[in-house]
Amino acid sequence: MTAGIRNCTSHDRRRNVAAARARSGLRTALVIFGLVALTSSGTPLVPPANRAAHAETAPRHEPDLGLISASTLAPVRERWIVLDARPGAAYRDGHLAGALSFSWEDHTSTDPDGVRYQPGPPESIAQTLGELGISASSPIVVYGDAAESWGGEGWTCWLLAWIGHEGPIRLIDGGIEAWQAAGLPLTTDPPAARPPVDYAVSLRPELDIDTNNLRHPSQPFTVIDTRSNAEWMAGRIPGAVHIPWDRFSTGADHRPLEPAALHELLAEHGVPLDRPVVYYCTGGIRSAYCWLVHQLSDLPDARNYEGGIEAWDKLQ
């Protein structure tokens, strides 16, 4: 399968999933969580091959998530705001021209309860994005190196979805390795500054879960621990299923699993495919990558327990 074909397949997959959820599947999943489903029409920001369809009516968007191949992005890169989710040192060694550094290491901290790796308040995140020239409707491409960034590209996509980003969010399929394998250039030049803008938050709480609701759920979840074998053996959330996060990608360039492969992986571990899933790790980074792979498949919406084992241990 070529990169371009994979990208189109991803687009069609997300469009079909969104339509099916709007009809029935999403309604069922949201009833489980006790939420209200809202969608909205959108104005195309990029060519049809590079965008997901928007549902009609209502003032709220579902996250517009998808994959984009390096070869598809290259000729239209300037139409997108590109975020490099790798560590800052890797960014400085070479990045896509115009890309902004946006590593989880720079945008998480220890909260007042002593829980590490926590994102700031949504309004603070919105201010940071606005200062970078990013609005809620901006088309965004994220890339990383899944191994080096510990799944940080998934965390960036999750963070944007959580605070209510309305524009398309695309992950480069295969990350920076795929970009380089396609013979595309990197640069060490800093990006040109963008004028600051306002970023309007429309929080999607259904994409996260707090410790209390995880301990005392109103409806059953399947909880998946995405940490390493050693971390799992040292202690885990009772009842969790263990699937290390690196099982959610494939190949030397860590491409997200295709839906069929994800279904097989989950079934192999006894995970019901019709039940909501909560992913967790130490602090919500690796689990966010797994959340993203899940969201790119035709499964009920998942949640990322961004507090992770750090929050679980602190608040027991």
Image: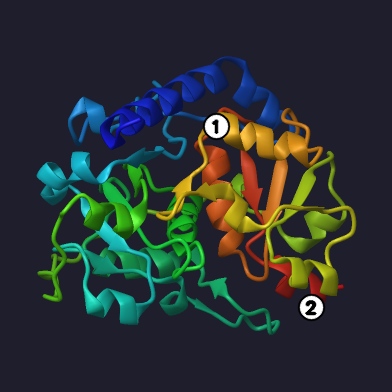
Q: Nearer the viewer, residue 85 or 166?
A: 85
| Element under disc 1 | helix
As drawn, 45 above or below 13 = below
Reading the image, the residue beneath label 1 is 259
| Residue 204 in view, yes or no | no
Residue 82: mark in rendering: none
As drawn, 97 above or below 279 = below
Q: Please tell me how crowded label 1 is: few (under 14), some (14-19), or many (20+) other residues with Cα within 10 Å.
A: some
Quadrant showing the N terminus: top left
Residue 140 is situated, as x and y percent measured from the top left of the image, at 29, 50
Residue 247 is situated, as x and y percent measured from the top left of the image, at 61, 51
Residue 109 is situated, as x and y percent measured from the top left of the image, at 54, 81
| Element under disc 2 | helix
| Residue 150 in view, yes or no | yes
**Residue 183: which quarter of the image?**
bottom left
Residue 102 is situated, as x and y percent measured from the top left of the image, at 35, 69
Amino acid type at image mark 1 = Pro
Reading the image, the residue beneath label 2 is 314
Of pointers 2 and 1, the one earlier in the residue sequence:
1
**Residue that sits furthest to the top in the current view:** 23
Residue drawn at point x = 56 percent, y = 22 percent: 21
Tell me whether the residue at label 2 lies in contact with that at label 1, contact meaning CB atoms closer than 8 angstroms: no
Q: Nearer the viewer, residue 229 or 278?
A: 229
As drawn, 262 above or below 289 = above
Disc number lying in front (2 or 1) = 1
Q: From the viewer's perspective, is 192 left or right of 38? A: left
Instruction: Look at the image and name its color scheme.
Output: rainbow
Residue drawn at point x = 22 percent, y = 30 percent: 44
Quadrant showing the C terminus: bottom right
